[in-house]
Image (spheres, grey):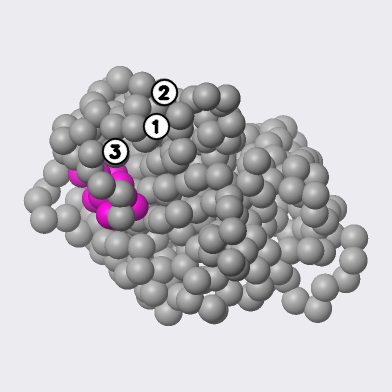
Amino acid sequence: MPLAVRSTGLVTSVGLSAPAACAAMRAKITNPSETRFIDSGGQWIMAHQVPLAQPWRGLARLARMAAMAIDEALADVPRTEWPGLPLLLCVAERDRPGRLQGLDEQLFGLIEAELGVHFHAQSAVVPQGRVGVAVAMAQARQLLAQPGGGIGQVLVAATDSLLSWPTLSHYEQQSRLLTEANSNGFMPGEGAGALRVGVADDKDALVVGGIGFGREAAHIDSEEPLRADGLSRAIKAALADAGLQMHDMSFRITDVSGEQYYFKEAALALSRTLRQRKTAFDIWHPAECTGEAGALAGASVIAVADMACRKGYANGPAILAHMANDSGPRAAMTLQFRSA
């Protein structure tokens, strides 16, 4: 069942709405600033921080960002209909260093309190990190396909932040942060995104046609030689699910955020899945503007693809999106913009 993206919401360091954030990403604008933390070299750690009205911290900050993104994505939906929407909330994976306590048990309730609404009983928390939105999309398909379920739309939201000392210190000790002394790293970030999806029809919409998953044994923390087996499997599964081939895709949007490992993986996966020569096969990576923001990655990728297609600056109507977790899970989705 193809899913149509009806509306989006984004809260990032470069924009507090989807139009603002996507315009900034199109212009390659970044907005890093000094955090409260210092690395082992005595330098302030730079990060992409969301400028909020109040200095919320921890779960309260995640809830506030998520509520802002959800409010934007549901702007065209009467509030009386919100309780009939299942909310699939994507958060950090359970093995993420420095993960906040209470993320699975408390965050959902805090978001409902911020919005003043209780979502559908089939709502769920999806603790799958960067691949979480793809997992939530697969779950949304199942919810929408339930016979007699009465669910016409599903809300997929993601909120995450790497800006806590337990998380930053771990990545800094592993030499994975982008600093003056380390060019092979990422700049941490935070943010939230929301996607309102339904069954594809004859209206203009970005359609999620295929979804695929894989697992990489040679993940970034392993010492195995990287061959991109997991990502290749995920891409092939997504293409097969949509009935497409790699050469049918116009370009790629991914979650890569600066580390050479993930760029190499994307290149290897492309070489193993593309069977017809293409003169150009661009790769977009929104994290260069928003920073590495964990679970936000999937929502950011889809929101950017949706805006690019609607505004007419996409490289074509067919897009391959793929995401990867540090511990090995891989996910891919085929996105196509269909006009009425």
**Residue drawn at the location 14% of the way across and 44% of the way down:** 56
Label 3 element class: helix
Q: Are marks 2 and 3 in contact (CB under 8 Å)?
A: no
- Contact (CB < 8 A) between labels 1 and 3? no
Find the magenta span and give its range. 64-75
Label 1 or label 2, whichever comes before in sequence order: 1
Q: Which mark is residue 242?
A: none
State the SS at label 1: loop
Q: Amino acid at mark 2?
A: Gln
What is the spatial separation of the Cα atoms under label 1 and label 3, in whole angstroms? 9 Å
Left of 61 or right of it: where is 265? Answer: right
Mark 1 residue type = Pro
The percent coordinates of residue 77 (x first, y second) are 30, 49
Q: CA distance from mark 2 to mark 3?
A: 13 Å
Q: Secondary structure at mark 2?
A: loop
The residue that appears at 54% across and 39% down in the rendered structure is: 137
Q: Residues within 10 Å of mark 3 (few under 14, many from 20)?
A: some
Quick one: 83 or 248, which is closer to the camera? 83
Quadrant location of the C terminus? bottom right
- Which residue, as the protein is rendered here, is positioned at the far left? 54
Label 1 Cα neighbours within 10 Å, binned few <14 / some 14-19 / many ≥20: many
Q: Which residue has dot 2 on it?
A: 122
Q: Which residue is mark 3?
A: 82
Quadrant of the rendered image containing residue 115? top left
Quadrant for the N terminus in the image: top right
Indicate whether 152 appears above or below 30. above
- Name the residue: 39% across, 61% down: 290
Please indicate whether residue 106 sits to the left or right of residue 338 in the image. left
The x, y position of residue 108, in whole percent, is 29, 29
Q: Tell me, yes or no, whether the two marked residues, 1 and 2, touch with CB atoms within 8 Å.
A: yes
Which residue in the structure is indicated by mark 1? 86
Q: Position of residue 74 (x, y in %)?
A: 31, 50
